[in-house]
Amino acid sequence: MTTGFSRLRREDLLKTACEVIAEQGFGHTRTLDIARAAGVSQALLFYHFETKERLFAQAFSYAARQHLHALADVEQSAGTPTERLRSLLRLCSPAIPTEGWRLWIDAWSEAMRSEELEETSRRIDARGRTLMRGIIEAGVACGEFECPDPDATTWRLFALIDGLAVQTHAHPKVLSRRRVNVLIRSAASRELGVPADRL
């Protein structure tokens, strides 16, 4: 049976692994790098995760769980559809400095070669789209939004967000974070028929 201490230790190791992978990338991170950052031996890492590939997959799953918790907070909030959409756009915006986006972008690349990473990234993407589509549909139903096709709008907005995330992290001097926010809010404004300053 896994003890509470062991579960806590695994969570700490996964959190550290995410930080190291976000900094160095999947392709350049060694288990030794993670062990040193966590202050443990490589033997302990392999005791918990068996292989490097398993460690990386579980680290990404850990990051995915944190994002799912944040999405659940938005979903369960008591705000209006506009307020909930504003929270979701802020949560997903690449304009907010975060190591998370570097991990996601690298994981997308690795997902082309890893079934486990592909399944996890696809599940998180689908959960975000489901939430946004639900918010938009609620906004249409109560008259806050005008949107004939919430599903298409959701795909376009997430495609914009993901594309801007790649640009801002691969080419950080091309777009200011303020410009990124303006682009996302203005696109949502046009899609939903609401003033951009409300988003």
Image: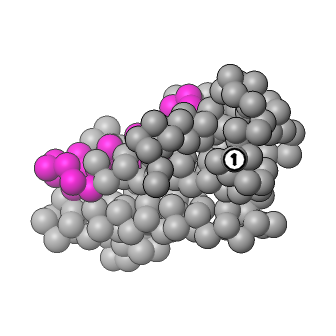
Front-lying residue, 96 or 14: 14
Q: x and y percent of residue 34 in the render?
A: 73, 33
Query: Does 83 sit left or right of 169 as displayed?
Result: left
Query: Does 7 sit left or right of 113 as displayed?
Result: left
Front-lying residue, 122 or 30: 30
Q: x and y percent of residue 129 in the render?
A: 44, 65
Find disc 1 in the rendering and name its residue. Answer: 47
Q: x and y percent of residue 88 in the render?
A: 37, 48
At mark 1, the secondary structure is helix
Quarter where residue 167 is shown: top right
**With respect to residue 2, does 171 lie above or below?**
above
| Residue at 69%, 47% in the rendered image | 47
Q: Is residue 69 magenta?
A: no
Q: Classify mark 1: residues with Cα within 10 Å, few (<14), some (14-19) or many (20+).
A: few
Quarter where residue 190 is shown: bottom left
Front-lying residue, 5 or 176: 5
| Residue at 36%, 61% in the rendered image | 132
